[in-house]
Image (cartoon, helix red, strand yellow):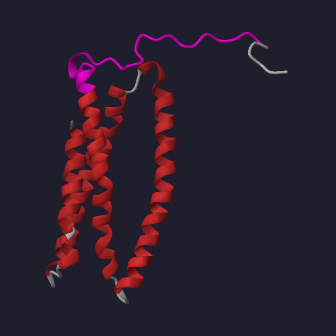
């Protein structure tokens, strides 16, 4: 639940920061930026701190390490091209916006657009978690399934 609330707050904070796309706050820009950055880091700490306990609750105990490894690989495979795409979009915005650093004002929009599907998927995960027992008696879908029987040497190989 903390992860969901933290992710929702993170999304709302970035949505609020999109105001810089349309308005320059003059002398208050730096103060607002520092204040919102401190708030953003506090929210990111809540999200990051609640993420591992969330995994411990939803991943099957018997295969926890495998699920964490798969999660890490998938995240990396998404983060690398996503970061490159973000850089390319900022370069494109710089060409459109012209000289100066106006294009950096679109960073919160980029982040909010990426956080919205993440928030939707986490809410769907929470709904499924509740269906499978929730806080009191959650059982992962794989609970009760035995590990596959190991094969004897040579069985199932193609010569």
Residue 111 magenta-highlighted: no
Image spot of residue 73 (x, y percent): 52, 42
Q: Nearer the viewer, residue 135 or 123?
A: 123
Please give the range of residues in magenta: 129-153
* Quarter of the image with the C terminus in it: top right
Q: Nearer the viewer, residue 42 or 97?
A: 97
Q: Nearer the viewer, residue 128 or 101?
A: 128
Image spot of residue 48 (x, y percent): 32, 45
Q: Residue at x 37, y 90 (%)?
A: 99
Q: Residue at x 28, y 20 (%)?
A: 132
Q: Is residue 107 above or below residue 80?
A: below
Image spot of residue 90 (x, y percent): 40, 74
Q: Is residue 14 above or below residue 117?
A: below
Residue 147 magenta-highlighted: yes
* Quarter of the image with the N terminus in it: top left
Q: Nearer the viewer, residue 140 or 46?
A: 140
Q: Is residue 155 above or below residue 107?
A: above
Image spot of residue 18 (x, y percent): 22, 69
């Amino acid at each position: 639940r903390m992860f969901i609330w933290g992710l929702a707050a993170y999304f709302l904070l970035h949505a609020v920061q999109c105001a810089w796309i349309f308005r320059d706050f003059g002398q208050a820009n730096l103060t607002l930026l520092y204040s919102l950055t401190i708030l953003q880091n506090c929210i990111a700490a809540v999200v990051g701190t609640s993420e591992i306990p969330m995994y411990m609750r939803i991943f099957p105990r018997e295969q926890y390490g495998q699920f964490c490894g798969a999660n890490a690989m998938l995240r990396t495979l998404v983060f690398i091209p996503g970061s490159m795409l973000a850089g390319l979009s900022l370069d494109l915005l710089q060409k459109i916006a012209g000289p100066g650093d106006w294009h950096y004002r679109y960073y919160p929009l980029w982040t909010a657009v990426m956080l919205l599907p993440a928030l939707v998927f986490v809410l769907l995960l929470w709904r499924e978690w509740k269906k499978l027992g929730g806080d009191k008696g959650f059982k992962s879908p794989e609970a009760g399934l035995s590990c596959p029987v190991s094969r004897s040497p040579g069985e199932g190989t193609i010569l």
